[in-house]
Amino acid sequence: MGLFELLQKIVEVLENLQIPYLVTGAIASMAYGEPRLTNDIDIVAAIEEQHIKGLISAFPPDDFYISEDMIRDAIHYHGQFNIIHPASGLKVDVIIKQNTPFDNSRFRRIKRIQPAESYQANFAAPEDVIIKKMEYYKKGGSDKHLRDITGILKISGHDVDREYIITWAKNLGLMKIWKAVEDRVSG
């Protein structure tokens, strides 16, 4: 199973269970920017207790690792859990949607994209991908986040609402990083 086949599987499951979701992280960065290697898929989803049984049954234990206890903990603590496909080494990080102004905003701004010929999926808007990448950079300092942001701005910059980014960067304490990103892109 390849990365985009696994993405198709998780999208089909979430849509069949009528769980609101969006694709973010490296996959979304590649959709708007430059390709790079990744072994994981980041999904933010509004999973609730009533979805657990359907999720578990959709990912058979012979092919996938998924833990009911981890799902329950993720829901309870507003965290995340994993779905792992051991045969390929691929992993899905499923992050539980928070009831925050930013999460609510990015769920209202979902973009429907066709990541492969055979299906469409809900993706975070490029601005929201950039904002989350800045947050992750602030937390961990990994330069890959800045490279992803730069790639998005180089490829899709003409479509990016910079005022929206600035508003959230101010609200989330990310202006210093945003200014560094702008310098990097214009330099």
Image: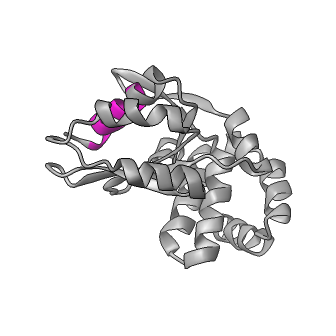
Viewer-proximal residue among 186 and 46: 46
Viewer-proximal residue among 60 and 104: 60
Q: What's the residue at 53%, 56% (across, down)?
A: 151
Residue 118 visible in the picture: yes
Viewer-proximal residue among 102 and 118: 102
Instruction: Check the picture and name the quadrant holding the N terminus.
Output: top left
Q: What's the residue at 51%, 32% (across, down)?
A: 50
Based on the displayed image, in which of its 4 quarters is residue 54 positioned?
top left
Q: What's the residue at 76%, 42% (across, down)?
A: 105
Residue 6 painted magenta? yes
Q: What's the residue at 23%, 41% (across, down)?
A: 2
Magenta residues (range): 3-12
Q: Position of residue 76 (x, y in %)?
A: 57, 53
Most prominent secondary structure in the magenta stretch? helix
Q: Is residue 65 above or below residue 55?
A: below
Q: Position of residue 141 (x, y in %)?
A: 56, 79
Q: Position of residue 57 (x, y in %)?
A: 30, 31
Position of 127 compared to 147: left or right? Answer: right
Based on the displayed image, in which of its 4 quarters is residue 159 positioned?
top right
Residue 168 painted magenta? no
Position of 101 compared to 139: left or right? Answer: right
